[in-house]
Image (tube, helix red, strand yellow):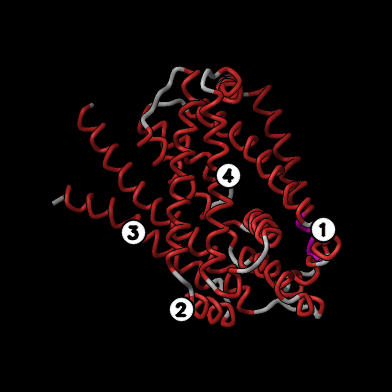
Amino acid sequence: MKKILLTILKIGLPVLLGVYISWYFWTSFDETQKEEFIDVFSRANYFWVFLALAIGFMSHLSRAIRWKYALKPMGYEPSTFSTYNAVMIGYIANILVPRMGEASRAGVLRATDDVPFDKSFGSIVAERVIDVICLGIISGGALLFNLDKIDDLIGLKSVINQAKEEESVSQTPWLLYSIGGIFILGIIGGLFIWFKVPSLKEKIVGFLKGLKEGLISIFKMEDRIPYLLHTLNIWVCYVAMFWVVFYALPFTAELSVQAIMAGFVAGTIGFIIVQGGIGTYPLMVGAIVTFFRAPEVIAAGEIQGEDVGFGALVWASQTVLIVVLGLISLILVQRKKKKLKAVA
């Protein structure tokens, strides 16, 4: 009976987590956004949506394989099955808690394949640096495509802020004071540990050494070419999975490359501004689509509802993919951990 209950919990809790995430996203929409969401979904050609999901899966698998190349110089060779599950669990953790995904990835691989947390975390940090460079290159390309529209695109900020009804500027100093206070307390706490708690100091130094080894692992690897090819594939897939959804609706199917590249960068910024891109991703993509479809509407300080709905379609397809695959990975990891305990 106990085993049955544990099995139900291991399978049921991830499912409940998925239900909670879906509910959380839905309740974050206002009534207008809900109507736009439903309307666009009812009109979409789902062939293109599912093609985008397939491309997205390829990017996640490629990321899992790429990670293995970074771990190999340190003497660790986990299976693609393990790195893939860790990547997907990291994605779903990032939706719930900002920047928790990196730590979750390293933690999962520590539990399933005994890869030291500090070393795998260091390889993830190095990976993020490379991804930032790739995003910068794509953003630069989008900039070149839209050189003649830069001033107008920058002017979209005021339209987006108005639509988002952001908090008043008077609250900003309090946020800065809070961040500054946390930073100062962190310095004081670090100095106290360094001089007063030798045992903890040694653990921190050991962690930093492992982190350093993980960071420089990329420069030591023999498989640089496959690593770079997977990096290229990941970002080509990212752009492609965004691109193909434009063909799912008549009013976006004929938009130019300039619009698509600008929309991709705007959507990525939306993910950075708010965890999971809740609200901001559809709004920012919608603003770009309206800018290219109906500049007179943007000039009036408005964003067309169906364009925000399109942004919601892109966002939802990407998010649902991460949630579903992440939950499956959670279940698979739980089963693997159970088998490892049985063998031990």
Q: Indicate whether 93 appears above or below 148.
A: above
Q: Earlier in the sequence, mark 3 or mark 1?
A: 3
Give the magenta range. Answer: 169-175
Amino acid type shown at disc 2:
Ser
Residue 114 appears anywhere in the view: yes
Identify the residue at image location x=67%, y=69%.
289
- Name of the residue lying farthest toward the left: 1
Q: Earlier in the sequence, mark 4 or mark 1?
A: 1
Q: Which mark is residue 15?
A: 3
- The foreground one among 302 and 31 is 302
Residue topped by disc 4: 235
Residue 326 image point, x, y percent: 41, 50
Residue 245 image point, x, y percent: 53, 63
Q: Indicate whether 326 appears above or below 309.
A: above
Magenta stretch: residue 138 in it?
A: no
- The foreground one among 35 and 139 is 139
Report helix, strand or loop for mark 1.
helix
Q: Alpha-carbon distance for marks 3 and 1?
A: 40 Å
Residue topped by disc 1: 173
Relative side of 260 to 20, left or right: right
Q: Earlier in the sequence, mark 3 or mark 4?
A: 3
